[in-house]
Image: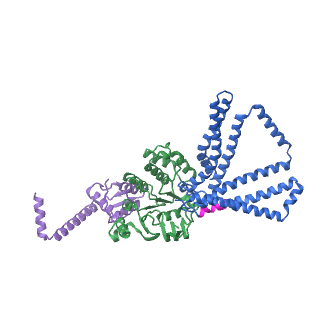
Amino acid sequence: MSAILECRNLTKKFGSKTALLDANLSIERGRIVGLLGPNGSGKTTLIKLANGLLTPTFGEILINGMTPGVETKKAVSYLPDQNYLPDWMKVEDIITFFSDFYDNFSSRKAYDMLSRLNIDKESRLKTLSKGTKEKVQLILVMSREADLYLLDEPIGGVDPAARDYILNTIISNYNENATVLISTHLIADVEKVLDDIIFINNGSIILTDTVDNIRENKGQSVDSLFREVFKC
Amino acid sequence: MEWTFSPDRPIYLQIVEQIKLKIISGEYPPGYRIESVRDLAEDAGVNPNTMQRAFSELEREGLVFTQRTSGRFITEDVNKIKELKDSMAIELISEFFKKMQEMGYSEAEILEFIESIVKE
Amino acid sequence: MLDKLLKYEIKATSRTFLPLYGAIIIMSIVNRALMVTDFLIPQVISSIILGVLFVSLFAFTIVILVQRFQRNLLQSEGYLMFTIPVKPNSLILSKMIVFFMWGVLSIICGIISVFILAGNQLELKRILSDLLTVLSRMNIDEYSFALEVIVLLIIEVAIGILMVYASLSIGQVFNKNKTLISFGIFIGIFTLIQIFVSVVVKAFNFFNLEETLMQTGDIKEIQIITLIAILINALIAAALFYVTNYMLTKKLNLE
């Protein structure tokens, strides 16, 4: 079974609100996939379901053929769309933390990336700027040798130079056994990096295709197609 | 290396074109050992699969070959490179003619134009 | 993985407790030192400071209990804690164990402080030898009874902690007024437990066990009652743990 992420009739409701409706997906290994949709379209819900942070109302979601649990958490590396590290820790503390809990975490790789960005390992997370904190979070995620990377809006609030750095890190980390799922609404920046795309709106998946197909068959970029499809 | 990509065509095709230009211009001379797919992908800011697809295409066309242990190389077949150069030139010229004809010039007028420009 | 969780929980909480313990010990020494002098105003001031610290110790322990659970599991840090490959029951257990640890340490700190303030060597020796005498004179029945009482006490404290955890984990499902709802649920759980216990007691009365107990006054009867109390309480604790675990596994609602 080579599909790293599978959704079958996946549905998630919060009371009367349906965040995700009947999602069916099969994502292969070695792909960089864009989960594209406007805010509130269900992207974060899907990612949280993959992480086991939410349980499905109906249907199932499988990582490597398993339902989300302790085993899948070992194989999934998640970058949330917010600050989630304990403020009181120093950079080296959180590196040790990741090292303690994840067998596939490489401290060496993390320290390597940190030094290249001139981030002092002795500094407390509380004292770092927003942009630096985000870079630290990204470094932690990318220093793991996971099967599935789930990046929720990784380039959302950062400057263009940082964006380039982040996308570059994703490319250089690429390995054909792992898959990266990038959820974003900033398509033009990431399009060059994506293999496949998923359009999602109002909790429903409306399109899945490869970037090459869209450009060849429709003669337009994914960004341009997105604007068409999601016209207000 | 500066890579520029237009957004409405598959990137792998654009990479193929740009590599071809480097081959015929001599920037990638015959027998040149190409960097790894990963390095080039990083350099160009594109997905490694895309870069790989471009090189598979170039291999299919015989412009690039892989040696298991030593890596990827530009072909040493100079004739092939000349052929490529010529066919790209022909394509450019055909494009030029087509555009000029769209503007309303006849073939004879186009040739006159070219001669006068060359003389300057 | 539990040991690693314990390590981090201790690290996170010792930043609050250790300085507090240090301050209490130092202020106790200061107070004691001032007592032998005639400086009245400094004596009063340092007594007040010490008093405040003692109250803080108690207050902090309760606040940290709630705050650690809330902040580390139910707010943004939850994204970290619930994606590391550990089971939620380990997360709950690690916090409980560490809380117990600080509870015991706080009591010890309090005792040390009292000795610094009011003790002298002679009294200390006397208290210790009295204690040893009492212990050596106990028979096996009294030992096991003492043990049972301690176990019962621990379970009771565990119930207290788990009531807070269960309330917080149920409250987090709601999007607004979480704190208010959690508090309301806490009252609700407390009431439920009271009802449950009184039902159990009524059942005992039904079987006239209370009378039997009062007639004999034998330690064995009291022991059986204590054991049954342990069982009932352990059941309540288990139920609360189960509820908390269920809410954190199936109904997690991180913002």
Residue drawn where x is 60% and y is 56% of the image: C86
Per the rendered image, the range of residues in magenta is C241-250
- A232 to A123, vertically: above or below: below
**Residue sticking out furthest to the top:** C38
The reply to whether residue C87 is in sight is no
Quarter of the figure with residue A210: bottom left
Note whether C130 is above or below A175 in the view shown: above
Drawn side of residue C134 relative to residue A174, left or right: right
Residue A197 position, x and y percent, is 42, 66
Where residue C75 sits, quadrant-wise, is bottom right
Residue A71's place in the image compared with B104, above or below, is above
- Secondary structure mostly taken by the magenta-highlighted segment of the chain: helix
Is residue B99 a member of the stretch shown in magenta?
no
Q: Nearer the viewer, residue C101 or C210?
A: C210
In the rendering, at what x and y percent does residue C175 appear? 54, 62
Q: Residue furthest right?
A: C216
Q: Left of C222 or right of it: where is B9?
A: left
Q: Which chain is green?
A: A
Q: Which chain is purple?
A: B
Q: Is residue B84 left or right of residue C31?
A: left
